[in-house]
């Protein structure tokens, strides 16, 4: 269940996030090796892993399911995003169970369930009768997001992480495509760990203590324009504040958190300075294709699971006239973002430091 934004509209989150819970002082989670018998490969050196033959329903029902899913959660957090092909046995209920257990087994609070989207819920024309499943529909997008349907010279505004405007933002998202166009509709992900590692040490130290304010007033505008109300658990505020950087609870690695249109400003800076930083973070993504992975959806029920605390993603709207594109998405709620000054960057933790000059 989503927390009420109306009750907590003034939360503050860091610009840099690290993922170790300062409340429990837990150590980074370690892989047990339970997934070693499943074929997999890294899609790029920095981000992405694919399990070409694994069946997620089998993992959910295996005798050692908790061990398997815990290792899967750690793998997702370390690699940013993982891919599975043709998961025809996975329905909406199993999808929800999987995303919730990934969060629970990697240590999220017992009070965190699944997110209900302010707009993309059961009340929409192309939705399903389950508020915790958001239907990502090209047809619905054409109707609701009219400003995004215009031809444009830059797609940089597509980059975002899911629901960072929430007081308790997301840990993991699972997107399963059920209908594909003839070609096109790829999704890209980029590593927030690597964005942080591309920044010089003095600049990292400046960024580490900053926080940012988040909001998404567009949802209110969409609801007003189309004559419906956003979900009652979401309130009219749809805003909050958070670290611009934060720590990943599974591995304790630092990641740049303040990316995307949900971020309104970096707190404590002049407007010009805040705008410069937020633009620069996106520049680091779009100007460095080697910290991205581009995924081609090949079959109905191909799916991706990613960690919103350490990656950003962008859809590719290049399939006009090539057929509809539809997906079912489940989004888990994690914990309030925080920054732990004792946390490390990904390259530092893996012994892969290199000079940034």
Image: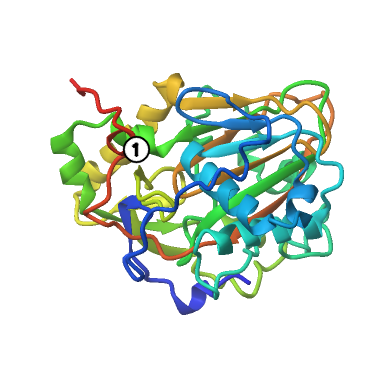
Q: Residues within 10 Å of mark 1 (few under 14, many from 20)?
A: many
Judged left or right of residue 174, residue 103 is left
- Residue sitting nearer the eye, 257 or 102: 102
Q: How far across and down, in percent of the image, does residue 12 sit?
A: 33, 65
Decide if residue 133 is in sight here: no
Judged left or right of residue 166, residue 14 is left
Up-down: is 88 above or below 240?
A: above
Q: Secondary structure at mark 1?
A: helix
- Locate residue 291: give its quadrant: top left
Q: How far across and down, in percent of the image, does residue 241 sit?
A: 36, 62
* Rendered residue at 39%/60% (across/down): 337
Q: Farthest residue to the bottom: give it.
A: 7
* Rendered residue at 34%/34% (across/down): 350
Count of marks, rendered view: 1
Judged left or right of residue 195, residue 60 is right
Q: How far across and down, in percent of the image, does residue 130 sit?
A: 79, 64
Quadrant into which the C terminus falls: top left
Residue hosting label 1? 346
- Residue sitting nearer the eye, 262 or 211: 211
* Rendered residue at 53%/57% (across/down): 170
Up-down: is 231 above or below 57?
A: below
* Rendered residue at 38%/38% (across/down): 193
Q: How far across and down, in percent of the image, does residue 110 sit?
A: 55, 74
- Locate residue 8: give its quadrant: bottom left
Colouring scheme applied when the structure was drawn: rainbow
Decide if residue 315 is in sight here: yes
Quadrant into which the N terminus falls: bottom right
- Locate residue 149: give its quadrant: top right
Judged left or right of residue 265, residue 109 is right
């Amino acid at each position: 269940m989503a927390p009420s934004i109306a009750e907590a509209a003034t939360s503050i989150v860091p610009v840099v996030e690290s993922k170790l819970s300062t409340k429990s002082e837990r150590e980074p989670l370690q892989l047990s090796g339970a997934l070693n018998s499943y074929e997999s490969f890294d899609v790029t050196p920095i981000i992405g892993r694919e399990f070409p033959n694994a069946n997620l329903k089998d993992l959910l029902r295996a005798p050692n399911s908790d061990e398997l899913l815990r290792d899967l959660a750690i793998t997702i957090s370390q690699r940013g995003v993982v891919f599975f092909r043709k998961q025809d046995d996975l329905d909406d209920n199993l999808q929800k169970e999987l995303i919730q257990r990934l969060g629970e087994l990697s240590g999220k609070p017992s009070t965190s369930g699944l997110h209900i989207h302010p707009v993309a819920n059961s009340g929409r024309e192309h939705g399903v009768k389950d508020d915790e499943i958001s239907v990502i529909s090209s047809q619905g997008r054409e109707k609701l997001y009219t400003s995004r349907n215009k031809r444009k010279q830059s797609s940089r505004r597509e980059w975002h992480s899911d629901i960072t405007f929430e007081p308790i933002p997301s840990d993991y998202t699972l997107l399963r495509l059920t209908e594909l166009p003839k070609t096109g509709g790829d999704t890209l992900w980029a590593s927030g760990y690597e964005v942080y590692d591309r920044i010089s040490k003095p600049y990292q130290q400046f960024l580490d203590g900053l926080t940012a304010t988040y909001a998404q007033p567009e949802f209110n505008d969409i609801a007003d324009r189309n004559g419906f109300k956003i979900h009652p658990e979401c309130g009219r505020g749809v805003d909050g504040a958070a670290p611009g950087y934060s720590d990943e609870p599974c591995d304790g690695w630092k990641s740049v958190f303040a990316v995307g249109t949900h971020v309104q400003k970096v707190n404590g800076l002049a407007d010009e300075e805040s705008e410069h930083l937020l633009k620069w973070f996106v520049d680091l993504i779009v100007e460095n294709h080697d910290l991205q992975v581009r995924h081609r959806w090949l079959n109905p029920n191909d799916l991706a699971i990613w960690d919103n605390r350490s990656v950003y993603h962008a859809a590719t709207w290049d399939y006009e006239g090539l057929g509809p594109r539809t997906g079912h998405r489940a989004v888990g709620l994690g914990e309030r973002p925080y920054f732990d000054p004792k946390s490390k960057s990904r390259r530092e933790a893996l012994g892969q430091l290199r000079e940034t000059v």
